Amino acid sequence: MTIPASGRVLSVSQDDVHRFSKTPVSEICIVTGLGVQGDAHAGVTVKHRSRVAADPMQPNLRQVHLMHAELFAELKSQGFNVRPADLGENITTEGVDLLSLPRDTLLRIGDDVLLQITGLRNPCVQIDLFQPGLLKAVLLRQPNGELIRKAGIMTIVIAGGTVRAGDSIHVQLPAPPYLPLERV
């Protein structure tokens, strides 16, 4: 598997309340084993409302949400206006094809932060409340019926620290065989 060795952080965001979009900030503090300090999705156990309803004690595999800024240009060409933090991500990236990375890939951000990819974000109908038709643009169906989810990836925190726009992102693939990303 060939991937770019590095990329960068374009923007960071957080929100202490469960809302669709997050608030862009100058930096976020990422806490080992929890997620973004002060974010509604931080915690050892799951915080996403639908997942809490199913089983509030399941592990939180969605501690930090990353989205690739390249998606915004793609969506713009389809008539949508999406900016960093609009779709609820904590870290907006540039230069790394997040969706092509296998599960358990490590992302080193800046000098200290280490995130482990757990899977894909599963976009929900709230996206259409943000902009009508956007769900169909980020959740495609292949001719064979397979879904392609484009709304970013979810990670857990292996090592914490501060993340700011401009920080480098270095990719470390896990040992083969590579496991495909599935929704978490």
Image (cartoon, helix red, strand yellow):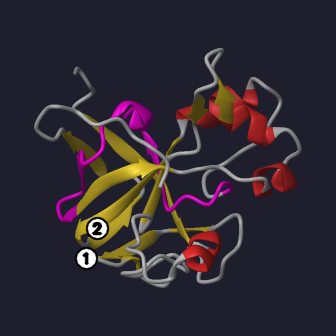
Mark 1 is on which residue type? Thr
42 relative to 148, above or below: below
Is residue 105 highlighted in magenta? yes
**SS at badge 2:** strand
Residue occupying the point 28% across, 37% down = 179
Q: Do the residues labelled 1 and 2 touch (CB within 8 Å)?
A: yes
Observer-nearest residue: 89 or 174?
Answer: 174
95 relative to 162, above or below: above
Residue occupying the point 39% across, 65% down = 61
Q: Which residue lies furthest to the top in this view?
A: 143
**SS at badge 1:** loop
Q: Position of residue 166 (x, y in %)?
A: 37, 51
Observer-nearest residue: 165 or 161?
Answer: 161
Q: Where is residue 96 in the image (x, y as percent from the top left)?
A: 37, 35
> In the image, 78: left or right of 86?
right
- How busy is the neighbourhood of tag 1: few (under 14 within 10 Å), some, or many (20 plus)? many
Q: Position of residue 17 (x, y in %)?
A: 65, 82
- For mark 1, what is the residue? 32
* Mark 1 / mark 2, whichever is N-terminal: 1
> In the image, 64: left or right of 71?
left
Q: Which residue lies furthest to the left in this view?
A: 175
Mark 2 is on which residue type? Val
> In the image, 26: left or right of 150?
left
Q: What residue span does the magenta drawing correspond to?
A: 86-113
Q: Where is residue 135 in the image (x, y as percent from the top left)?
A: 76, 42
Q: Quadrant of residue 22?
A: bottom right
Residue occupying the point 42% across, 75% down = 58
- For mark 2, what is the residue? 157
Q: How many marks?
A: 2
- How busy is the neighbourhood of tag 2: few (under 14 within 10 Å), some, or many (20 plus)? many
Q: In which quarter of the image is the N terminus?
A: top left
